[in-house]
């Protein structure tokens, strides 16, 4: 242990701790902008500079390791002057003008610039903003970059590279021309970006955000000709409460459903339903592949960020992917066929909207092979915004239930939202379908939680089924390399985002380790409290097969619920 | 003026004509002895920071690692500095002998000489010399029959001033973006490819070779207490005879160097001020230059000796133009990593440009505030010293700049 003095208090911390970490342990807040506890140290913003007794210049708290008997001052007139000047410089590089101000900036509610301004007690801004003449990057279906608001903190670079193992952003040029951009300025839509949106979570400003669909959704809701149905992904209900400070409970399923009705959706359905359906199709596929010994391991296919990742980086493994569409797209396909047919509505007039924790789902919905089955994808953040904009008091709404037809689901569908959930849901069903026996213990603890790569072995009819789970593309890459090196599995679940969909790029900001854990706990609690916990026991799924799809893997099921992939190159 | 030069001299190009006195002596000494000799000489780094060379080598020697690197910094990007170029073009054997001597002392097996990309002649000469030295067994396996082996490669600079900073230089050699690294770890601990690395300037290494050849006492007898030996100065600006001169520390004042070596100010005009250590140092008014040329005297005067560039500036120049030039240089040369240096230098340049006609107290205040912030908070030496020139001009020539109070609207 090292003992040092911070602002007159004696503090004892582990060797190797930085001043910033030590100060946080002592509940002293030092402002930062380029720091993210999950990423490597950059030392660029300099807001965290502190005085160390005996040293002439200030030192960055984030990059300075504590030493025995060090005497640190984190707040003083001198430091305050420096921080205020720094902030003036930053804010001037962040081209705020009349059209581009905090009133209209969609990140205003979680903008770290605003928070820092408050924390340092900013008093004046004497410098003119600098217009660097940047254009918005709107080349992607999922992510927009507004370089005008970028302060070149490098957090997106590190997030994409260190956590996601993709490496889309780089710093280009030097001097005043220094900018963060994509390779050769090609734009996010023209590079290997997987659309996972993790960079949005770390960006401290409004420079990165999703492609907004809510304006279009308002238009559709206001069009009396249109029959607008909505589906909500499992991870949305455990995070939607976050932007509404008054709500204590992490889960707001009933209130979320009620709010969607109030917004004017004609039917409110649940993606959990098609998650159950995915299990039926994918489970059948797994059983077939094991019987035929072909294309093993089977890789899950419900995370569109992962799909684009493998299409770029591991095209040789495309035939290992399950051919199942994701639950979102299965829902879209059924909405415009089964649902339309049974309710006698012209599919032309049906608008399918999804609410997803995910930015990559926007890209997925736009893939040509998906036939525009899903018309618009809202992120959890966009839904929260619409609810607020409509003056709906979410915390005080009376709870409502999903519409039944595509809205009844099992607990297995619920846990799709957490890393390991698809695996667990599939194991519950595959075990019972293969053995014909009832599972004694439904919880597969070893595939749950936040470790980056998880493994399990389950004995089914004498076959030791080997499974692995990876979440976060950096971990996916690691696991793929091991598979390349010969590690053998039958079934592998991949999710692009750390923690699975609960940590998706469309979830409320902040999304960090603590928040992810809270959402995971809420998801498993939902599952635990359900009577129906296995996909194949969902009566409405059984009915769907009877009335429409015949059986899992049928010709019709293939036509509607399955898809294909293509190599995209690097 | 020195009676006998220590570093400068006739062209030394052909390894066949050269005896390698330093190497021969060094190989007959223990590493500790070589290091002690350099320590005794009082040699300090000539790359700008003035870190004691013997101590640096000792730290490098003590690092435990199977692989160590010795790097010669020949990036010489500071405007008004051209002494390393002189050495590479005229005394290249001394430069490389210095590199090998240092490598032997710290026990490095591999080395690089990183030469500024625009120095075509230096690159050509050193490139050819390295080839020849391999042929003559003065590089490679068992140098000159000793059991010391050392490989040296030439790397061409990427054309950025910041790459002269040792951590940026390491990134550049590794093929990464030329931006500074966070210190610690220092290159001595974790440098090139994460291995212990000693970086020295061309002049430092050449001096070291001469010191080993001639003995520390000869060197330490020259100069002052804290500035031992000799220094190459680069005289430029409004000077009759600009060029590289070797001076003994403390033997002449700055004024004398300008008058005796540089033969005074051009066209008989009047000197206004001197930039005593390159554009990252504070200027000295003509009334302040009657001080001995040593590290300590310059520091006392509020400036520094920097890399040895002495730029003399006559009365006829426009002060704002001069500040704009220097500001432009730093604005363009920041690596762009840290906010104070990147945004601060950008803003200062804007203000200087915009208010070329009238300078208000408010603007002066902003420049000073921003300057102070950059000095205290920038990530590397480039930023930390980028406002020295401008601030000193604003301070010393406030009246001439016509800084006036402008009422806020
Ligand atoms: C912005 C910047 C530029 C520098 N440029 C040079 C240079 O061109 N040549 C040089 O030898 N040292 C330069 N230095 C100093 C080096 O970082 C380093 O201190 C030096 O090479 C060490 O050698 P020495 O101990 O022999 O002086 C520069 C430092 C900074 C911060
Ligand atoms: S990023 Fe922050 S400071 Fe910038 S416009 Fe948006 S809310 Fe305002
Ligand atoms: S969306 Fe994901 S892959 Fe694309 S740039 Fe952001 S972090 Fe990288
Ligand atoms: S886009 Fe955001 S995270 Fe990336 S460098 Fe700019 S401000 Fe930082
Ligand atoms: S001070 Fe300037 S050159 Fe140094 S790291 Fe910061 S931006 Fe780069």
Image: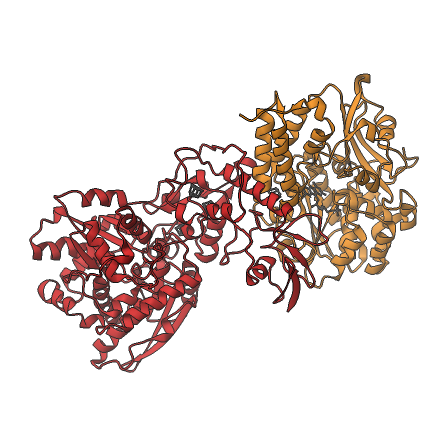
Chain colours: A red, B orange
Q: Is residue B100 visible?
A: yes
What is the number of callouts on the image? 0
B278 to A83, vertically: above or below: above
Q: Quadrant of the N terminus of chain A?
A: bottom right
**Residue A129 in picture, x, y percent from top left:** 49, 34
- Which residue is pictured at 41% across the width and 55% down the height? A510
Q: Quadrant of residue A270?
A: bottom left
**Residue B271 in picture, x, y percent from top left:** 79, 23
- Which residue is pictured at 47% across the width and 32% down the height? A131
**Residue B330 in picture, x, y percent from top left:** 63, 35
Give whichever of A430, A232 is nearer the camera: A232
Q: Is residue A235 left or right of residue A267?
A: right
Q: Is residue A264 left or right of residue B213?
A: left
Q: Is residue B157 visible?
A: no
**Residue A171 in picture, x, y percent from top left:** 51, 44
Looking at the image, the residue that sits furthest to the left is A344
Q: Quadrant of residue B14?
A: top right
A125 to A25, vertically: above or below: above
- Which residue is pictured at 66% across the width and 31% down the height? B326
Give whichever of B127, A57 is nearer the camera: A57
B317 to B296, vertically: above or below: above
Q: Is residue A119 left or right of residue B257?
A: left
């Amino acid at each position: 242990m090292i003992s040092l003095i911070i602002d007159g208090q004696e503090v004892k911390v582990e060797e190797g701790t930085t001043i910033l970490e030590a100060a946080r342990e002592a509940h002293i807040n030092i402002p930062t902008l380029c720091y993210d506890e999950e990423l490597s140290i950059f030392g660029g913003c300099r807001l965290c500079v502190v005085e160390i007794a005996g040293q002439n210049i200030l030192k960055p708290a984030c990059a300075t390791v504590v030493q025995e008997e060090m005497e640190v001052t984190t707040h003083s007139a001198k430091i305050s002057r420096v921080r205020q000047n720094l902030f003036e410089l930053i804010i001037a590089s962040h081209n705020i003008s009349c059209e581009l101000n905090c009133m209209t900036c969609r990140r205003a509610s979680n903008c770290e610039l605003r928070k820092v301004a408050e924390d340092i007690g900013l008093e004046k801004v004497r410098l003119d903003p600098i217009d660097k003449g940047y254009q918005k990057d709107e080349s992607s279906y999922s992510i927009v970059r507004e370089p005008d608001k970028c302060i070149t903190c490098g957090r997106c670079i590190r997030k994409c590279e260190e956590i996601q193992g993709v490496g889309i952003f780089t710093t280009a040029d030097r001097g005043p021309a220094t900018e963060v951009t994509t390779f050769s300025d090609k734009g996010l839509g023209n590079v290997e970006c997987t659309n996972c949106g993790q960079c949005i979570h770390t960006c401290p400003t409004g420079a990165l955000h999703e492609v907004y669909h809510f304006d279009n959704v308002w238009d559709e809701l206001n069009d009396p000709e249109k029959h607008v149905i909505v589906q909500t992904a499992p991870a949305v209900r455990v995070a939607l409460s976050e932007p509404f400070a008054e709500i204590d409970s992490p889960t707001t399923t009933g209130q979320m459903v009620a709010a969607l009705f109030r917004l004017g959706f004609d039917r409110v359905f649940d993606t959990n339903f098609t998650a159950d359906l995915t299990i039926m199709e994918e489970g059948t596929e797994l059983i077939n592949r094991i019987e035929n010994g072909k294309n093993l391991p089977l890789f899950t296919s419900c995370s569109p960020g992962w799909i684009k990742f493998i299409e770029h980086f591991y095209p040789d493994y495309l035939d290992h992917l399950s051919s199942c569409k994701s639950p979102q797209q299965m829902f879209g396909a059924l909405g415009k066929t089964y649902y339309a047919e049974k309710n006698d509505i012209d599919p032309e007039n049906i608008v399918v909207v999804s609410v997803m924790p995910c930015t990559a789902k926007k890209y997925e919905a736009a893939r040509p092979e998906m036939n525009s089955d899903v018309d618009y994808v809202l992120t959890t953040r966009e839904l929260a915004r619409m609810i607020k904009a409509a003056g709906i008091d979410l915390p005080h709404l009376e709870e409502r239930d999903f519409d039944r037809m595509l809205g009844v689901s099992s607990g297995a569908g619920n846990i799709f939202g957490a890393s390991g959930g698809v695996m667990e849901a599939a194991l519950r069903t595959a075990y019972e379908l293969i053995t014909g026996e009832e599972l004694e213990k439904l919880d597969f603890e070893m595939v749950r939680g936040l470790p980056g790569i998880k493994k399990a072995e389950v004995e089914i009819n004498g076959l030791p089924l080997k499974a692995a789970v990876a979440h976060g593309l950096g971990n996916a890459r690691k696991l793929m390399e091991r598979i390349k090196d010969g590690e053998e599995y039958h079934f592998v679940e991949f999710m692009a985002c750390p923690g699975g969909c609960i940590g998706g790029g469309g979830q409320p900001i902040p999304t960090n380790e603590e928040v992810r854990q809270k959402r995971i706990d809420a998801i498993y609690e939902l599952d635990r409290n359900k009577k129906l916990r296995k996909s194949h026991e969902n009566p409405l799924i059984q009915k769907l097969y009877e009335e429409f799809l015949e059986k899992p893997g049928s010709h019709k099921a293939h036509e509607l619920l399955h898809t294909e992939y293509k190599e995209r190159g690097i | 003026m020195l009676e006998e030069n220590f570093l400068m001299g006739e062209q030394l190009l052909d390894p066949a004509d050269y005896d390698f006195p330093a190497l021969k002596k060094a190989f007959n000494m223990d590493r500790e002895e070589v290091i002690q000799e350099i320590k005794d000489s009082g040699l300090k780094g000539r790359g700008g920071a003035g870190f004691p060379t013997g101590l640096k080598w000792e730290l490098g020697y003590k690092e435990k690692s199977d692989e160590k690197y010795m790097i010669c910094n020949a990036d010489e990007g500071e405007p008004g500095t051209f002494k390393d170029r002189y050495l590479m073009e005229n005394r290249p054997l001394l430069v490389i002998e210095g590199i090998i001597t240092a490598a032997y002392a710290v026990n490095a097996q591999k080395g690089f000489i990183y030469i500024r990309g625009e120095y075509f002649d230096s690159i050509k000469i050193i490139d050819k010399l390295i080839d020849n030295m391999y042929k003559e067994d003065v590089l490679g396996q068992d140098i000159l029959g000793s059991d010391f082996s050392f490989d040296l490669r030439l790397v061409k600079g990427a054309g950025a001033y910041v790459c002269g900073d040792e951590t940026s230089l390491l990134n550049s050699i590794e093929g990464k973006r030329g931006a500074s690294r966070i210190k610690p770890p220092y290159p001595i601990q974790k440098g090139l490819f994460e291995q212990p690395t000693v970086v020295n300037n061309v002049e430092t290494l050449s001096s070291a070779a001469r010191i080993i050849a001639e003995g520390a006492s000869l060197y330490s007898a020259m100069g002052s207490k804290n500035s031992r030996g000799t220094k190459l100065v680069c005289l430029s600006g409004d000077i009759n005879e600009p060029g590289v001169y070797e001076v003994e520390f403390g033997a002449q004042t700055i004024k004398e160097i300008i008058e005796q070596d540089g033969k005074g100010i051009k066209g008989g005009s009047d000197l206004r001020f001197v930039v005593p250590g390159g554009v990252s140092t504070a200027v000295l008014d003509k009334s302040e230059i009657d001080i001995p040329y040593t590290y300590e005297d310059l520091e006392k005067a509020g400036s520094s000796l920097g890399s040895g560039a002495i730029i003399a500036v006559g009365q006829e120049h426009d002060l704002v133009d001069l500040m704009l030039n220097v500001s432009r240089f730093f604005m363009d040369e920041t690596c762009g990593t840290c906010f104070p240096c990147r945004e601060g230098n950008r803003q200062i340049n804007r203000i200087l440009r915009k208010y070329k006609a009238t300078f208000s107290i408010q603007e002066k205040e902003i420049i000073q505030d921003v300057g102070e912030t950059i000095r205290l908070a920038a990530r590397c030496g480039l930023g930390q010293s980028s406002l020295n020139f401008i601030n000193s001009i604003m301070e010393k020539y406030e009246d001439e700049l016509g800084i006036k109070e402008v009422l806020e609207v």
